[in-house]
Image (cartoon, helix red, strand yellow):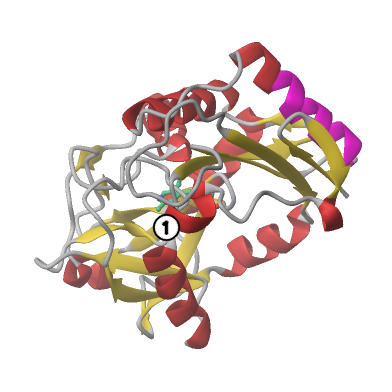
Amino acid sequence: RVAYVNGVYQPHGQAVVHIEDRGFQFADGVYEVWSVFDGRLADYEGHLSRLARSLTELRIDIPMSAQSLGIVLRETIRRNRVRNGLVYIQITRGTAPRDHAFPTDVAPSVIVTAKSIDLNKGEALAAKGAAGVTHPDLRWGRCDIKTVGLLPNALAKQAARERGAYEAILFDEMGMVTEGSSTNAWIVDENGKLRTRDTQANILRGITRAAILNLVEAEGIELEERAFSVEEAKRAREIFVTAASSFVMPIVSLDGSRIGDGKPGPVATRLREIYLEQAR
Ligand code: PDD
């Protein structure tokens, strides 16, 4: 495998950044993840513009043109011979002697990696449905910025894994679901209405979420962008989560209670199917 690090393609095993990179010391950096289908980047523009927004919000210089970035992403995919998989980019403020305040005259660090994924595994899980557990949302107040500060997300995901679950569904002090640890969360409520939390809240504006919203409209599915509680999720007909890395993943149990009839529901199944169709 090969990684791109600050202008150079290096063997993945030897690719390094400096010990005083601010990503390492302060989580002072942002990232994006695209899925790759048949060699194509899904939702390319959406992730690219969110990356630019994350950088702008943190006042990190945009290190290269969108065109050059596209070339690097595609070249990393090519050199790793990825047909189906994920490509990851991380941009940090750069390397400077440790000081909380921003350094001046520092060049951002840019790394890109790509890896292949066996799509059949995800398909098998989606056909069966995945387990979810609830977990308090312990994150900061700017979850709309896709920063590499993912410790609360990692703790929540680990708690899920230790309970044999695929995803942790996070909830706020009011018992309302915010999102998943690395996904956006959706339900088909008791009345059959599709719901997902609005993006005025402190959550990530998922690019897959946005793509699904377009499909929902085209399909004529009734939708409400309104927060739902853990209790409502447990009574829901369906729960599913969306992300570049999992597309649309049905959640068929939450904290061990069965959701609907314990099988992937028709809305999640249909949305997964048409999302994958249009992404290819
Ligand atoms: N995670 N919410 C959170 C907290 C996320 O980390 C992600 C993505 C999403 C879904 O966003 P999108 O549809 O744009 O992928 C929602 C990526 C995949 C990750 O951390 O690997």
Among all residues in the image, which is located at the extreme left?
174
- Residue found 57% across the figure and 22% down from its top: 63
Q: Quadrant of residue 9?
A: top right
Amino acid on which disc 1 is placed: Phe
The stretch drawn in magenta includes residue 163: no
Q: Is residue 179 left or right of residue 125?
A: left
- In percent of width and height, residue 175 lies at 14, 69
The stretch drawn in magenta includes residue 79: yes
Q: Is residue 188 above or below residue 273?
A: below
Classify mark 1: helix, strand or loop: strand
Which residue does the numbered mark 1 point to in the structure image?
240
Magenta segment boundaries in residue numbering: 70-80
> How many marks can you see?
1
Q: Front-most of 258 and 7?
A: 7
Can residue 219 be seen here?
A: no
Neighbourhood count class around disc 1 (C-alpha, 10 Å): few under 14, some 14–19, many 20 upward: many
Q: Front-most of 121 and 60?
A: 60
